[in-house]
Image (cartoon, rainbow, N blue to C red):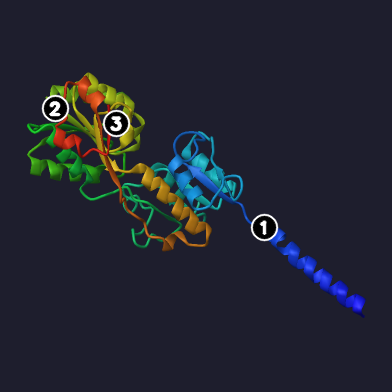
Amino acid sequence: MNTNIHLVALGTLLFALSFPAAAQQAKKVHRIGYLGGGGSNPPPSAFRQGLRDLGYVEGKNIIIESSAERTFAARAAELVRLKVDVIVSGGATHTRAAKEATTTIPIVFMQDPDPVGNGFVTSLARPGGNITGLSSMVADLSGKRLELLKEVLPKLTRVAVLGNSANAGNGTQLRETERAAGALRVQLQYLDILSAKDIETAFREASKERAEAVFVLRGPVLNTHRTQIAEFAVKSRLPATYPQSGSVEAGGLMSYGVNQNDLERRGATYVDKILKGAKPSDLPVEQPIKFEFIVNLKAAKQIGLTIPPNVLVRADKVIR
């Protein structure tokens, strides 16, 4: 009898000791699908750092999947076939491809100029469906950029605006810029950039109409060809302002806009909440809270422009 009791006790003890190990082995490794950039580009470093800060380690408790298919639609379809737990999109074009590929897998966009207008969410407060994320749209951001340009060029009266009519957020940005231009008594010349071949033509038209500066709106095409736009601005000796820091790092004069790294880092918090059971429809779309003003003094020197000290002192970063 005693022997049987000891055997039962020993068996119970061994089971209890083995349970944590079995539970650890059974712990799920989450699969995150990334759709953005070109080819099988990895997610932005700020997003990956955000995941690490939340305790996720690639290869240990998460795997990040991407696709090298030629089109965004094909890449999104491949991520669906891989049965990822969540899809993270880099921009509106990528989000649309993911939206068309699945209505069940959660989708997190790291930036979108107009998620409601693009049809991704019902409202910012109540997204509905399987999509949520971060909006890059801020009221009067274009107006603030034009004000800074006017401070750099106090006598400014004519500005060429480079936009992309195929971009969903183009109209909103242009209207904001037009309102600011009216208050600042600046005349705008809108020039549509649908592809790289339109850039040279646009700058030729800007010079022909005696534009004194260039104002670049947000958009995938404009961002993709930011280096070419910056080079033409220098060649035309036209001061130019951009919505993203990458354009200044590519040789542009100045930028004021949303801190992209902050949006990407915050995108990781959405993924974390979803992996822990939250539904995208219950996670409100958040808006930017950090902004940055960057000035490139090298570019200023190339066009013979002096940035006023009272403007330069407000820059978050100065490229010398």
Q: Where is residue 248 in the image (x, y as percent from the top left)?
A: 29, 31
* Badge nearest the viewer, 3 or 2: 3
Q: In which quarter of the image is the N terminus?
A: bottom right
* Badge nearest the viewer, 2 or 1: 1
Q: In this view, does 262 lie to the left or right of 4?
A: left
The residue labelled by disc 3 is: 248
Separation of residues labelled 3 and 1 (CA atoms): 48 Å
The residue labelled by disc 2 is: 211
Separation of residues labelled 3 and 2 (CA atoms): 20 Å
The secondary element bearing badge 2 is classed as loop
Residue 11 visible, this angle: yes
- Residue type at mark 3 is Val
Q: Which of 288 and 183 is in front in this view?
A: 288
- Residue type at mark 1 is Gln
Q: Nearer the viewer, residue 17 or 137?
A: 17
Residue 188 visible, this angle: no
* Badge nearest the viewer, 3 or 1: 1
Q: Position of residue 89 (x, y in %)?
A: 44, 45
**Who's the residue at 30% across and 26% down the image?**
251
Furthest residue in direction bottom, as rendered: 1
Say whether disc 3 or disc 1 marks the residue closer to the N-terminus. Answer: 1
Q: In which quarter of the image is the C terminus?
A: top left
Q: Where is residue 278 in the image (x, y as percent from the top left)?
A: 48, 62
The secondary element bearing badge 1 is classed as helix
- Residue type at mark 2 is Ala
